[in-house]
Image: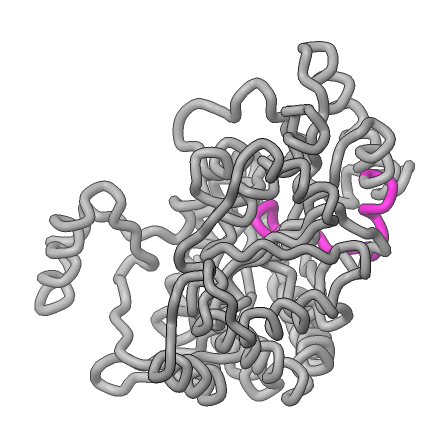
């Protein structure tokens, strides 16, 4: 399996070949950041501004951003920028003071969840959210065993990394973690994907018990983004969630990737599957680039955790964070971004499927809304597909279109633009991908 940070990564050994100011900047970053300096693309990019779905270099060259779900409502959205700056001018203090704006935002956000998910704890990142959710699950169930999919990524804290198989360059997940196959419908015949995935979960629970680990939770991103994007059929998660609950565990819905209207059908990805999570985690898209995250759960789960340890986050639930988060929710509603994600996402899939008829190296197009994976012929060991994906991602970069890669073998092109993506943006992407496929051996 290719580690997630190796997908489309710049090779630091090539820094001396870049030349000019870019070489100096990359070398300085390498000197300062050391081994943790990770950049995209064979030739890194330096941007100085962004607006909506476009990013701009210092000389004014525009790149279409079809990759970045962090600015969920578009780069530098004026309403979000204004909300942050106005609140900064007035007040920003940590969360151990009462502030009406924070309470109002919490109420507004919770109104998008089932009524029993009535408690919220704010964090700064999705990693912190997943770390906290796992700790809550363990405190509530008394178990420690966790089930994840084989190429999952849930964050970079110590605990979140342990349940992120795609993070490991060496070694493997710890003994209390069980890794199951991604929910690929091609593996599920004749039982059907729901029964197949539930059977994998059941086998993992039994194996944990045989080795003395009580089940705590199944944690899953409901679009299975790092596994290569597996969204269909809607509802396939139900049997697996019921299996977990029957064994005394919790279902943690990691909504960092599919949340905030990304699927176009529901505000949260789990909604497509007709399930009700025990814990929901939020991150990146929540603040449109401002560092925000949250954990939403039932009161009894939060109370079990707080009975064992307190929780306080200095930079979460500040007045500025609340103002930004509220602005993001308002933009999603006022600009009808859920219907836009559904409409434009359907057009995107239609155009990609059309490309697949002309380019046989595309073996599958998967996803829903504005989160789509384009699988490439993997070869016997995945190497050929990974190499092709890397070449296509860099070829698109040369044509000023930005996408990423995903999947166990790194052979899935990941298309995940801001929710403001339009049909015109799709046409730019498709034309560039068509040309890149034609010119890439």
Main secondary structure type of the part rendered in magenta: loop
Please tell me whether residue 226 belongs to the stretch shown in magenta: yes
Which residue shows up at 68% across the image and 11% down it? 212
Residue 3, image quadrant = top left
Q: Is residue 55 above or below residue 136?
A: below
The answer to whether any part of residue 435 appears in the image is no
Residue 199 placement, left or right of 95: right
Q: Is residue 86 above or below residue 310?
A: below
x, y percent for residue 18 = 15, 61
Residue 130 placement, left or right of 180: left
Please tell me whether residue 49 belongs to the stretch shown in magenta: no
Residue 380 placement, left or right of 107: left
Residues drawn in magenta: 225-240
Looking at this view, is 289 or 350 the one in front? Answer: 289
Q: Is residue 350 above or below residue 35?
A: below
The answer to whether any part of residue 252 appears in the image is yes
x, y percent for residue 137 = 66, 36
**Colour scheme in use:** one colour
Which residue shows up at 56% across the image and 75% down it? 100
x, y percent for residue 20 = 8, 68
Q: Residue furthest right?
A: 191
Task: For the C terminus, give its image quadrant.
Answer: bottom left
Looking at this view, is 356 or 209 the one in front? Answer: 209
Residue 289, image quadrant = bottom left
Looking at this view, is 263 or 277 the one in front? Answer: 277
Which residue shows up at 67% across the image and 60% down it? 365
x, y percent for residue 208 = 70, 18
Which residue shows up at 40% across the image and 26% down it? 170
């Amino acid at each position: 399996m290719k580690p997630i940070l190796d997908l489309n990564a710049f090779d630091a050994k090539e820094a001396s070949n870049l030349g000019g100011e870019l070489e100096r900047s990359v070398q300085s970053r390498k000197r300062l950041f050391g081994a943790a300096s990770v950049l995209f693309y064979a030739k890194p990019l330096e941007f100085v501004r962004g607006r909506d779905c476009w990013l701009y270099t210092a000389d004014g060259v525009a790149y279409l951003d079809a990759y970045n779900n962090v600015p969920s409502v578009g780069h530098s959205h004026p309403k979000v920028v204004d909300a942050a700056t106005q609140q900064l001018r007035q007040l920003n203090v940590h969360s151990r003071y009462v502030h009406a704006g924070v309470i109002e935002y919490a109420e507004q956000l919770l109104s998008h969840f089932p009524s029993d998910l009535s408690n919220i704890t704010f964090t700064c990142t999705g990693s912190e959210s997943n770390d906290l959710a796992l700790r809550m699950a363990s405190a509530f169930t008394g178990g420690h065993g966790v089930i994840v999919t084989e190429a999952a990524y849930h964050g970079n804290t110590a605990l979140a990394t342990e349940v992120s198989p795609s993070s490991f360059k060496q070694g493997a997940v710890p003994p209390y973690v069980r890794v199951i196959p991604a929910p690929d419908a091609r593996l599920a015949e004749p039982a059907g994907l729901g029964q197949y995935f539930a059977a994998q979960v059941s086998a993992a629970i039994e194996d944990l018990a045989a080795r003395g680990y009580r089940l705590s939770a199944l944690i899953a991103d409901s679009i299975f983004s790092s596994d290569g994007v597996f969204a269909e059929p809607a509802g396939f998660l139900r049997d697996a969630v019921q299996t977990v609950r029957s064994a005394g565990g919790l279902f943690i819905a990691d909504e960092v990737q599919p949340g905030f209207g990304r699927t176009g059908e529901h505000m949260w990805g789990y909604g497509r599957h007709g399930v009700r999570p025990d814990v929901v985690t939020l991150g990146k898209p929540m603040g449109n680039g401002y560092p925000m995250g949250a954990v939403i759960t039932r009161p009894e789960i939060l109370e079990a955790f707080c009975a064992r340890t307190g929780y306080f986050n200095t930079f979460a639930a500040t007045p500025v964070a609340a103002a930004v988060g509220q602005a993001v929710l308002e933009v999603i509603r006022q600009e009808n971004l859920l219907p836009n994600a559904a409409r434009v996402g359907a057009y995107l899939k239609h155009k990609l499927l059309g490309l697949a008829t002309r380019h046989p190296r595309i073996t599958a197009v998967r996803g829903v809304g504005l989160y789509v994976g384009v699988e490439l012929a993997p070869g016997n060991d995945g190497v050929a597909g990974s190499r092709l994906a890397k070449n296509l991602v860099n070829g698109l970069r040369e044509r000023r279109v930005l996408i990423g890669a995903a999947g166990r073998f790194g052979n899935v092109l990941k298309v995940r633009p801001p929710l403001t993506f339009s049909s015109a943006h799709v046409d730019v992407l498709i034309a560039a991908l068509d040309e890149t496929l034609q010119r890439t051996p």
